[in-house]
Amino acid sequence: MAGTSAVRSVLAGLSDTRDWQQDLYRDLHRHPELSHQERRTAGKVAERLGRAGFDVHEGVGGTGVVGVLRNGDGPTVLLRADMDALPVRETTGLSYASTATVADDGRGEVPVAHACGHDLHVACLLGAATLLADGAGQWNGTLIALFQPAEEAGDGAKGMVDAGLTQLIPTPDVALAQHVLPAPAGVIGTRSGPVLSAADNVRVTVHGHGGHGSMPQATVDPVVLAAMIVVRLQTVVSRETPPDETAVLTVGSIQAGTKSNIIPDSAELLLNVRTYSEQTRRRILDAVRRIVTAECVASGCPREPDFELFDRYPVTSNDPTATDRVTRAFTEVFGEKVQTIKPQTASEDFSDIPSAMGVPYTYWGLGGIDEDSYQRAAAAGRVSQDIPVNHSPKFAPVIQPTLDVGTSALVVAAMAWLATG
């Protein structure tokens, strides 16, 4: 690979960043912040970028931070990390586990934890940005380090774009991002084409006619109606979606009624749809509307159902040329640890940023599970039972080698465009 010596020269500084990165990671893990509230995290990011010599822009899209490092003529590369945490009570037992809570009207104190690994993403990108700044003699071009808020809310990337991101930074030649996954630490997974699904959340409200539980003949029961809808929706994937297309439709919540002997006026269903193509996405959402509407007619509802789409995520589809370039660079440095990742039915809003600028992107997976633990679980056929996944209260990547590999991966990927020799 052209630039291999330059890459290795930049990575030689990894031992100098390791201690502060590990301390920073533990600190971020101990002090998580929910979407749109990442002020403390953003402050630490801005301070570290400024110390490394970046031009720093704070408050982009709320709490977003962007650092720009210009180093002569050459390509422009954007590296992105997300910063927000989740309303989850951590049960990892780690010495640096989160005990953070935030006040929430009506529900008291809500626990907060980095149960998805975004704290690791921040630490890795700050380390990579520092290494590239220190090793500026090995590359030419412009490096953009972008720290995005509110990925978990699905609107952080778009919020940065709407706040004028495209006018704030030079247009990159490529955008790059990674995510820690429940795979063995040290493994890197790349894939051309769709790698993360689109996601659509749907709030459906069906309207019945309430009354006394002893006189159901005088009502239109929305609880029974909701049950019929749930059953019928199971056919959308199993009977309306071709077997060679991947799709998931989940009913995650049904809310109706207050007492056992009261038939309520309405019921609310929360649906989650995951797809990999716009055609399948439209077909499934249309089917949901058709089935719900038909069941309401069959039940004699006094009014039509209400539909609300919210927290929508785009499909993440990696550019083939950019992905090939990054995969070859990874293989040169990491060897057999580089694998082809399967499409994930998780979702991300990262692609909203490169899509808004019309630039190619690639997004890869980073293993974060202790390798011995993972292999024991695999040998026993218990990976799904014994290995905590993202958003689990027990999810916590092992610090090493995850942090070193994640930092190195960002450097290697960026240098695939920026290296001088």
Image (cartoon, grey):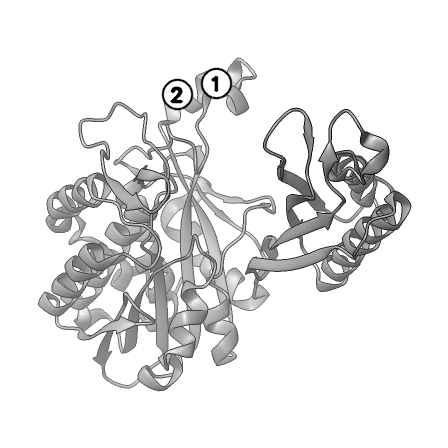
Q: Residue at x 38, y 21 (%)?
A: 372
Amino acid at the residue labelled 2: Ser
Above or below for 325 versus 231: below
Q: Are marks 2 and 1 in contact (CB under 8 Å)?
A: yes
The N terminus lies in quadrant: bottom left
Q: Is residue 220 left or right of residue 98?
A: right
Circle 2 packing at 10 Å, graded few (<14), some (14-19), many (20+), is few
The C terminus lies in quadrant: bottom left
Residue 416 % position (x, y): 38, 66
Residue 348 % position (x, y): 50, 56
Residue 47 % position (x, y): 12, 63
Tell me the tag on residue 152: none
Q: Is residue 232 left or right of residue 129?
A: right
Q: Residue at x 73, y 36 (%)?
A: 211
Amino acid at the residue labelled 1: Ala
In-front residue for pair 236/53: 236
Q: Measure the alpha-carbon separation of dots 2 and 1.
A: 6 Å
Q: Residue at x 72, y 48 (%)?
A: 206
SS label for mark 2: helix
Report which residue position mark 2 lands on: 373
Q: Residue at x 18, y 71 (%)?
A: 136
Tell me the tag on residue 377: 1
Decide if residue 421 is in sight here: no
